[in-house]
Image (cartoon, rainbow, N blue to C red):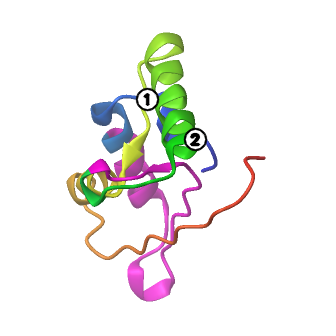
Amino acid sequence: MKWILHDWNDEECVQMLRKCKEAIPSKENGRKVIIIDMVLNDQQKGADDHEAIESQLFFDMLMMVLVTGKQRNEREWAKLFSEAGFNDYKTTLVLGRIH
C-alpha cells in the first residue's frame, strides 16, 4: 500500500491492516504486507535537518486538513502494526525523492 495509510486516522488504519491480515496467506506461506509511506523523524532523537523536519510537518498538517490522516513516526507505526496483530514486522527507512 503506497501512500494510503497516511490518509486515515489510527483506528481506520488498524481496521485496514486487520483486513489485510485476514486476506493474505498464513505466515508460513509467506504472508507479507508492504507499506510505503513517510516515517517522521523522532524529534527526541535531535534531528538536525530543519528542511526535512519542515517538509514532514507540512505533510502532517496537509493530512490533518484534507483528510483525517496524519504522518507517523516509527513508534506510531509500530503501535498500529501491533494493534492490527502484526507482531513480526520490519521497517526499512529509505532516503530519497518523493514519487
Mark 1, mark 2: which one is toward the viewer?
2
| Position of residue 57 in the picture relative to residue 11 (left or right) | right
Q: Position of residue 41 (x, y in %)?
A: 41, 52
Mark 1 touches mark 2? (CB < 8 Å) = no
Which structural element holds mark 2? Answer: helix
Inspect the image, locate mark 2, and give the three-letter code of the amino acid beneath it: Glu
| Above-or-below relation of 53 to 61 | below
Q: Point out the stretch of residues depicted in magenta.
A: 15-43
Rendering quarter of residue 72 = top left
Nearest to the observer: residue 87 or residue 69 = 69
| Above-or-below relation of 93 to 18 | below
Label 1 and label 2: CA atoms lie apart by: 25 Å
Residue under the point 29% across and 60% down: 45
Q: Residues within 10 Å of mark 1 (few under 14, many from 20)?
A: some
Q: Position of residue 86 (x, y in %)?
A: 30, 65
Which structural element holds mark 1? Answer: loop
Residue under the point 44% across and 37% down: 71
| Position of residue 33 in the picture relative to residue 68 (left or right) | right
Res. 51 mark: 2
Res. 21 mark: none
Inspect the image, locate mark 1, and give the three-letter code of the amino acid beneath it: Trp
Nearest to the observer: residue 37 or residue 35 = 37
Rendering quarter of residue 81 = bottom left
Residue under the point 41% across and 88% down: 28
Nearest to the observer: residue 6 or residue 94 = 94
Q: Is residue 93 magenta?
A: no
Q: Position of residue 6 (x, y in %)?
A: 49, 36
Report which residue position mark 1 lands on. Answer: 8
| Position of residue 70 in the picture relative to residue 85 (left or right) | right
Q: Residues within 10 Å of mark 2 (few under 14, many from 20)?
A: few
Q: Position of residue 25 (x, y in %)?
A: 48, 72
